[in-house]
Each structure stands twice: as C-alpha cells, then as structure tokens.
Amino acid sequence: MNYSSKTADLSSLKTACLVLGVFKGNKPGNQFDLLDTAGDGQLKRVLRKNDFSADSGCTQLLYEVSGIKADRILLLGLGSPKDLNSRNFASAVSKATSLLQSSNVTEAVFTLPETEDTYSLVREAVISAEEAVYRFDQCKSDVTPPKRPLRRIAFQATGRKLVNTVNKACSHGLAIANGNALAKDLSNLPGNICTPTYLADEAKKLGRGNRKLKVSILEEKDMQKLGMGSLLSVSRGSRQPAKLIVMEYKGGKAGSKPVALVGKGLTFDAGGISIKPAAAMDEMKYDMCGAASVFGTLSACAEMELPINVVGVVPSSENMPDGDANKPGDIVTSMSGLTIEILNTDAEGRLILCDALTYTERFEPAAVIDIATLTGACIVALGHHTSGLLANDDKLADEVLSAGEATGDRAWRLPMFDEYQTLLNSNFADIANIGGRSAGTITAACFLSRFTKSFNWAHLDVAGTAWKSGSDKGATGRPVPLLTQFLMKRCKVTDQ
C-alpha cells in the first residue's frame, strides 16, 4: 500500500473513510470534538447509546455523517488513554485495516492520538497494516484477490514538523514491512521450491540493480577448499547442493566495520539419520526462517538506505537421511579446525552455523548476530512469544534486548555460564554436537560460542517465534523488526 500524511481540516477532508480514534470511557479528543461540532453532535449521540465500547480494536462504521465530507467514519477503539503505546495503537490499526479491506474501501485517513512519540506510533501502525493485508497464495491455483483492495492510508498531521515525522515513519515502516513480507514469503514456500539453490537465486535478485548490495555464492567446491567439513557433512545426505550465500550491504563509510547477520538456512530438516517424527514434519520447511530474516533485514536496510555496513551470511542446506548422510558417532572437522562428534544428526543447525561463523571472521565485524530456529528446548522455556538470546558480550545483548522491546519483537536472555560447556565434552573429539536433555538451548549456544571467540556475538533462537502452527500456520517474519531496529539504532537513524 501507499502511506503518507494529510494536513487538511478533518471536517472538509474528502476520503472514502475517516478513521477516528476514541478512548475507553468515551473520552474523545480535540479532533473528535471538532468533527462532532461540524456534524451537529451526531458523533456524541452515537457514543451515548453505548453500542460502541472503545475497547482497543473495537470498531463501528458510520455512513453519511452530516457536515462531514468523508463518505464514512470508522470509530476505532483505542482502549484506556494510560495504555496508549505504539504496540496497542498498531494492534487497533490492524483490526481497522482488516475491516476496511473487506469493505471495498480503497483509501482511508487515520487520525492520530496526541503523543510525544508520533514516529513510533505511525511506524508500527504501518507495519501492522501491512501485516493485516498480507496474503501468501503463490502456490494456489484459484486465487480471488479483493476486487477493490485498500490501496492508500494517510495519517492526519498538522504542522511541518509533524508532517515530516509522519512521512519518515511511513517510509521506515513500509521498508520494515516489506522486509518482513519477504522473510515470510521465503519461509512459507515449500521445500521442493525453496531449495538452497532457490535461496541463492533470490539473493542475487535482491542484489540486482543495487550498487550498495554485493552478493556472492560459494559452491560446495569452494567450501571444500575452505575446509568447511562440518557444513558439508550435513549436505551430504541431500541431492540438493549446499550454498553459502554472502550479501554485503555497503551503506556506511568505507572501511568501517560491518555488523554481520548469520542466518540458519535449512530449507528442509527431516532430522537426517536421527529422523524426526512424522507429525508436523511439514513445518520443517521453516527451519530456514533465520536465513529468511537475514534476507528481510537486508532488504529493509537497502530500501531505507541505512548509513551502515552489514554483511549477511547464510549457510543453506537440506538435512535428509541417505546412505552418505551423517551417522551418530561420526566425527567431522570444522573450518576452525575443531573436530566435532555428531551424537545426533538432528542437531545439524549448529553444524552449518559454526562454519559460517568462522567464515564471518574475515569481515572483521563490529558485532555478529546469528539467527536460528535451533532448539525445541527454547519453545519449552519461552513459548511462542519470546525469542531466546545468548551472548558473549553484555553491551551487545542489551542492544538486542532494547531493540526487541522497542518493536514488540521481544527476546529474553538466558545464561551461558562456563559450567554448561562441560556438557559438550566428548571422549573422541574436541566437542560433541549435543549436550544431553538438560539446558538444550544453552548448550546449543555454548557449542556456537566455541566458534565466536574473536568477535562480539549474540545468538537468537527463534524456534518458537518464527512461525505459527495450527489454523494460523504461517511464518511471522520475526525477528526482522528486532534486527532492523538494532541496525537503525546503531547508525543513529532512530533514537528509540
């Protein structure tokens, strides 16, 4: 959709729908009073009937209100004034957008409640509105799109300063939403379409025509020369060749150290010889959501032209059972030289990530964040609302947590004490790839930490947050909002 600001007087504004926020207790603001006066008290008469509760997201559509040029007025509940924040406002906007999309309304103007942080309010509203109209129908043969879809949303603003703020928020919000949609599209594709080769081609497409984004693909022969025995041991069980996808976004000063994002790209994970249960195995197409979030974040960076250098590294493979696949008890040698005893072939994400992390050293990164749907243990610990965070640097961890709070894409830090490292001891190799049933998320991060000693590193386990199951099955795009906010704050584009 298209997003912008509007400065016209509300009562004389010609629009298909004017969306008017109302707080709980029917405490309208100045804008409501002005419209009510123009409409000869009709709006307050509606409120007095108590059909409209003003609970957050509650809606009531009014037609042909006298004295007002808008074709419709949509009363939108905002809940209690003390609870107003960007996330609650965005949730209400999402419900309003869904209603407008189904009501043949092609454009609408939203009023804005008075707040000290209009930027956050509008940015999150745009992201939420795009989420409300997102559809994934690439694999359906009979698609019926809305005949008159919602195409334009404007936010009412007064004064040059507020107009500039709203326009910037719209631009940033749409870039993040587009990155989120890209991540969801890639994740929702089935494994027979979204293979490592497909991901590599999508990376090339992302870099095409963008002079600030350089894309290079390492083939298996290139990885063999680099000694990536851990990563290649996973791809041996698949007919699909592994790819190491490298995307370098150069928006910052030449020579300034980049932030590196490393995304796990298992386009399908059957578990290998340690095969997974059949139930819900189809959802293992989502084992590349970490990779998808790197694509989405770099897309947002490029669209906003962020003044920062970012490197995206995506190790991509399938994990399948085959005569040449890893076997429990096998020992492989990683790019770092560390030998790994593979006790469970379904703990393969860390096997491809460790070589990618070692490869990332060559960029001399200012910070590294890896993103992976790594452990079911993280879902047990944190459920489906919060991503797991582990790090070897407190300042970096705080930055990531802060970015999650600012966007509602929250993470929670788990400990990574030295005592946990002993759980990875092996009698036959330098390290085992699993540490037993206890503290599975922590020992997975401890494994990765062995390959991150030369840089500041944070690990996001998004196994519980990257997609939804059941009737709402589909990718969420997380943690694109968190990662983008992190980068925006790093390069001082936002001070949130």
Image: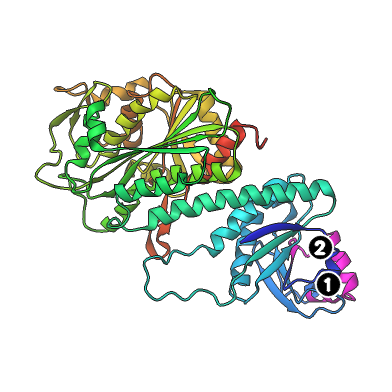
Q: Where is residue 115 drawn, in percent x and y?
A: 77, 48
Q: Evaluate if marks 2 and 1 touch, with contact meaning CB atoms under 8 Å apart.
A: yes
Q: Where is residue 111 drawn, in percent x and y?
A: 76, 60
From this viewpoint, is residue 435 visible? no
Q: Secondary structure at mark 1?
A: helix
10 Å neighbourhood of mark 1: few (<14), some, or many (≥20)? some
Q: Which mark is residue 28?
A: 2
Side of 400 relative to 69 (left or right): left
Which image quadrant for residue 281?
Answer: bottom left
Q: Secondary structure at mark 2?
A: loop
Between residue 57 and residue 192, name the one nearer to us: 192
**Which range of residues does the magenta coloring cover?**
19-46
Residue at the spot 62% in from the left edge and 77% down from the top edge: 104
Side of 433 relative to 372 (left or right): left
Residue type for callout 2: Pro
Side of 172 relative to 439 (left or right): right
Residue that numbered label 1 is attached to: 44
Q: How is the image coloured?
A: rainbow
Residue at the spot 64% in from the left edge and 55% down from the top edge: 125
- Vertical position of residue 390 compared to residue 299: above or below: above
Which image quadrant for residue 77?
Answer: bottom right
Q: Quadrant of the C terminus?
A: top right
From this viewpoint, is residue 64 visible? yes
Q: Quadrant of the N terminus?
A: bottom right
Q: Where is residue 288 drawn, in percent x and y?
A: 35, 47
Between residue 64 and residue 197, name the one nearer to us: 197
Residue type for callout 1: Lys
- Vertical position of residue 256 compared to residue 473: above or below: above
On whether residue 37 falls in the magenta region, the answer is yes
Per the model, the C-alpha gap separating discs 2 and 1 is 9 Å
